[in-house]
Image: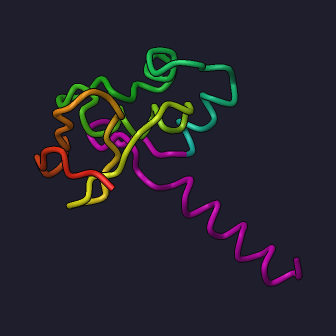
């Protein structure tokens, strides 16, 4: 890897860390990742440490994304690309309401 590639990788990492995960409480991905690195091993532990998932949507939007960061299986909505927890049908996207259309 040359210096330009290293610099671009660092810039992407910084930008990615500022990406909002919990829209209700304005909690960014970097905060979630730090909680996981500090020992939060479940969604409940991340939620207690960060406040993510405690907003008005009840973790419908951020829950699957946080769970995917924890290593749980998720699928992407074929309509909008939002993360949906893998599970028994019907899978309903919390963002756009599409049903069973996953990538």
Front residue of 93 and 52:
93
Image coordinates of residue 13 in percent, x first then y, are 64, 61
**Placement of 10 over or under 102, stated as above or below:** below
**Placement of 1 over or under 39, stated as above or below:** below
The residue at 34%/38% (across/down) is: 62
Q: Quadrant of residue 1?
A: bottom right
Q: Quadrant of residue 55?
A: top left
Front residue of 43 and 24:
43
The residue at 56%/53% (across/down) is: 17
Q: Quadrant of the C terminus?
A: bottom left
Image coordinates of residue 49 in percent, x first then y, are 51, 20
The residue at 34%/51% (across/down) is: 76
Q: Is residue 37 magenta?
A: no
The residue at 33%/27% (across/down) is: 53
Q: Is residue 18 magenta?
A: yes
Front residue of 28 and 61:
61
Image coordinates of residue 95 in percent, x first then y, are 19, 48
**Placement of 18 over or under 52, stated as above or below:** below
- The colour scheme used to paint the residues is rainbow
Question: 64 left or right of 68?
Answer: left
Question: 68 left or right of 23?
Answer: right
Image coordinates of residue 18 in percent, x first then y, are 51, 55
For this orientation, the residue located farthest to the right is 2
Q: Which residues are magenta?
A: 1-29
């Amino acid at each position: 890897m040359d210096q330009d590639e290293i610099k671009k990788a660092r810039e992407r990492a910084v930008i990615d860390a500022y990406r909002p995960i919990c829209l209700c409480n304005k909690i960014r991905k970097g905060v979630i990742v730090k909680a996981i690195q500090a020992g939060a091993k479940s969604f409940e532990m991340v939620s207690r440490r960060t406040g993510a998932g405690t907003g008005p949507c009840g973790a419908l939007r951020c829950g699957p994304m946080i769970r995917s960061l924890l290593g749980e299986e998720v699928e992407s909505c074929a309509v909008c690309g939002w993360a949906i927890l893998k599970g028994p049908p019907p899978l309903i996207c919390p963002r756009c309401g599409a049903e069973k259309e996953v990538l």
